[in-house]
Amino acid sequence: MAEPVVISGAGLAGSLLAVFLARRGYQVTLLERRPDMRRQRVAAGRSINLALAARGIVGLERAGLFEKLKPILVAMPGRMLHDPQGGTLYQQYSRHAHEFNWSASRATLNMALMDAAEATGGVEILFEQRVETYDYDRSTLLVHDTPKEATRHLPAPVVIATDGAGSPIRAAMVERFGVPCREEPLGHAYKELNIPAAADGGFRLAKDALHIWPRGGHMLIALPNPDGSFTVTLFMALASSHDGEPSFEELTTPAKLDAFFRAEFPDAVPLIPDLAYDFFDNPTGQLGTLRCARWAHGGQTLLLGDAAHALVPFHGQGMNCAFEDVVELDLELERRGANGVSSQSGNGTDWTEVFAAVERTRKPNADAIADMALENYVEMRDLVRDPRFHLTKKVEFLLEGALPGLFVPRYSMVMFHPEIPYAEAQRRGRIQAEVLAELTAGVAAPEQVDLARARAMLEARLK
Ligand code: FAD
């Protein structure tokens, strides 16, 4: 008999996980609080396009989906920096042409993953079913059926929670077992805006880049969509402070908003025709980091994706990290030869072992990317305006070329090297940053860097 598994949340992680579990032979029920976005238009939710990088691609390839999805992706080999005078500077993300990120529509990706889950024949997706909580004593989920306005208890001995940052299952675990979970609000929030396609359907900004308008304490970014439009996101402090930085709290009227954009992002103003409408109509999204001491409770529940470790979005890794979590669970099942079949003698999957192993492997990596994502906010909004930063980037490329295998820029390790776990990228990145600071002290051009010294320092410290 196929072993039943319930997944709470048919978002990106939950839908991909359903594909893997069904292919192993499990009988999967996927509960989703929203209506089916393939049949009726629903708000896409936070951030309607995302940077897909190598770690996420590993998961999509494992599911046999990446090639099929390529038509809905736009390649982004670099970033385009926009200065306050309207000038631009293009920076390639990597010295290797094959290393780049993709811009992906969240909704399209999610729908494709749901289709793939259903196509396995082993997944039932139940929409408009909001999980309220998990009862650890009875091993049941309390589920609210929105259309029927009725609540029921669903037997669920094994539940995987991929229901995002507000996970009710995490809340139940925290409440019942006192698991320490820390939510660290960033104090900065985001707002989505839109640059529509040109009249002829073309792109109104360079298509092959993630555009950034870095302004110190705030920034605007834009990611391309296949239809010629760009999804724009403004990141800024939520409330006013004494540091003179602008905040969402201050932008209360269309006139104030217009003046702010003209002063800060003049070249973006003509590209966003519905600025005031988008700004005042779209919600202001909160950002923060979530760190939980435990993700698993016995063999009953496991948190994955944002439910376990919501990140700030500045390294573009939340979904990529969530897909890595899902792959790790599948690998753990593979290592144990689990085939999704339970027998009378109780030879089913040892979920306690599997969940504990996933938590052990993934948690240190999720903690590492959470830190690196916070650091990247400073880099994106601030450092990219600093000439020393550009010199350091050039030296990084130089070292990577001269010392292959010994030096890989941290950005590249995170985005393009899924074989290097996040925690290792963080460790190596710290050492490399020290070495770079020493090598570039008093140096005005990359050619002045002493390569022999660089090699000796890296070999000694990276061991
Ligand atoms: P979610 O995508 O949040 O999915 C959770 C699902 O569970 C949803 O379908 C939801 O409706 C459902 N659900 C919630 N509660 C319940 C309930 N009670 N019962 C049933 N169902 C429920 N990541 C990247 O990799 N690259 C990027 O460039 C990037 N940019 C981002 C930009 C912004 C502004 C933000 C906010 C995030 C960004 N992220 C990015 C992060 C990324 O969006 C998340 O990490 C990713 O969506 C996590 O996937 P998930 O499946 O774990 O959770």
Image: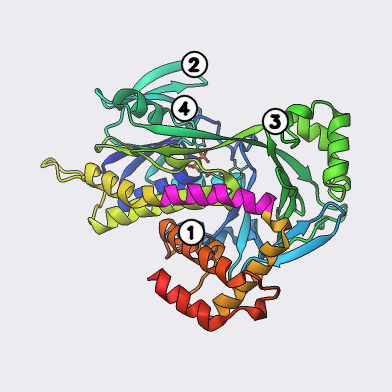
Above/below status of 316 relative to 88: above
Q: Main secondary structure of the magenta part?
A: helix
Q: Earlier in the sequence, mark 3 or mark 4?
A: 4
Foreground disc of the pair 1, 2: 1
Q: Quadrant of the N terminus?
A: top left
Above/below status of 11 relative to 422: above
Q: Which mark is residue 241?
A: 3
Q: Which mark is residue 55?
A: 1
- In x, y percent, where is residue 328? 36, 54
Foreground disc of the pair 3, 1: 3
Tag 1 near tag 2, CB within 8 Å: no
Tag 4 near tag 1, CB within 8 Å: no
Which residue is rendered at x = 38% and y = 24% of the image? 133
Q: Which residues are magenta?
A: 365-382
- In x, y percent, where is residue 102? 62, 59
Amino acid at dot 2: Glu
Foreground disc of the pair 4, 1: 1
Q: CA distance from mark 4 to mark 1?
A: 30 Å
- In x, y percent, where is residue 225? 70, 53
Q: Earlier in the sequence, mark 3 or mark 1?
A: 1
